[in-house]
Amino acid sequence: MILVIMGVCGSGKTTVGEALSAKLKWSFRDADSFHSEENKQKMSKGQPLIDQDRYPWLCSIHDYMATLIRNKESGIVTCSALKKEYRKILLIGNTAVEQCDVALSKGSHNTDGKKPKVQKDESESSPIVGSLSRSAVYEKDEKGVLPTETSLHSPVQPENLAGQVLFIHLTGSEKLLTERLTLRKDHFMPASLLRSQIETLEEMDTTENGLTVSVDKQVDQIVQDIIMRLDLNQSKCDTISK
């Protein structure tokens, strides 16, 4: 099982994810580690990402989760996963990107009102948008360590992870999240982007596998709430992790 801790900036995804990882003894990976330097620089300047910025990032996270599942490992990953189509990319990878690409070619627009320019990969065998062709299978080395993205070279085939991934949406008032972001130091995401993310956010619907958790309480209470609602007692966690 893979748990994706989702929500807007300031909702405590990393804090809750790390605490949940320690409690369940599952691996943890923060979505920020999958962002390109270009994305980080853009956000640090207060510029919201557009879909073409997010697609390679989301597919890289999909590839990582697919490898955990292939290795029969459970894990926890953070990701804002603001739109339903983004969550679909996390579940089925490049296949969903192709579907988004078709929609864009028919005239859909970005949040700035302009029709986006989609950069096609030169290889006919790759349906990947832009730099997505750098994605690769995350195979463990002889020491059992997953490599970093920069060390990967082999193309990955998208896998359908539906039924094996569960989204946990952390929610809180805009006032609370703004206060948290104001206190946060040494992070590329400024508090000014919160409003943009709230406007972009699409709540999960009944067709999606997930649950919503309020963050207006202590971290240990949030973690316990998640464990209880998912019925993840320690004995079950030990079994799932094996």
Image (cartoon, grey):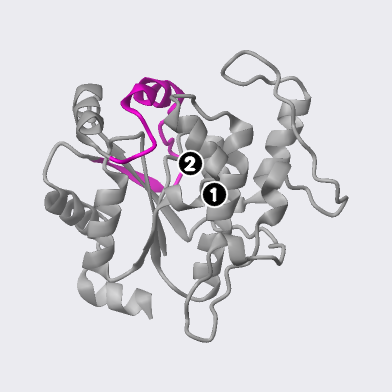
Confirm whether the magenta stretch covers residue 210. Answer: yes
The numbered dot on residue 151 is: none
Residue 202 can be seen, yes or no: no
Which tag, 1 or 2, sits closer to the chain's start?
1
Which picture quadrant has residue 230?
bottom left
Under circle 1, the secondary element is helix
Quadrant of image for the N terminus: bottom left
Residue closest to the far right: 124
Q: Horizontal placement of 155 versus 223: left or right?
A: right
Q: Which of 145 and 151 is in front in this view?
A: 151
C-alpha span from label 1 to label 2: 15 Å
Which residue is denoted by mark 2 in the rendering? 207
Q: Horizontal placement of 26 versus 213: left or right?
A: right
Mark 1 neighbour density, 10 Å: few (under 14) some (14–19) many (20 or more): many
Find out whether the residues at labels 1 and 2 contact each other: C-beta distance under 8 Å: no
Which numbered mark, 1 or 2, is in the foreground of this view? Answer: 1
Q: Where is residue 113 in the image (x, y as percent from the top left)?
A: 62, 13
Query: Considering only vertical position in the picture, is 168 above or below 19?
Result: above
Confirm whether the magenta stretch covers residue 152. Answer: no
Under circle 2, the secondary element is loop
Q: Where is residue 112 in the image (x, y as percent from the top left)?
A: 58, 15
Magenta residues span 186-213
Residue closest to the far top: 113
Quadrant of image for the C terminus: bottom left
Q: Which residue is drawn at 80% across and 39% down?
A: 120
The amino acid sitting under disc 1 is Leu
Mark 2 neighbour density, 10 Å: few (under 14) some (14–19) many (20 or more): few
The amino acid sitting under disc 2 is Thr
Which residue is denoted by mark 1 in the rendering? 90
Q: Residue at x 20, y 54 (%)?
A: 223
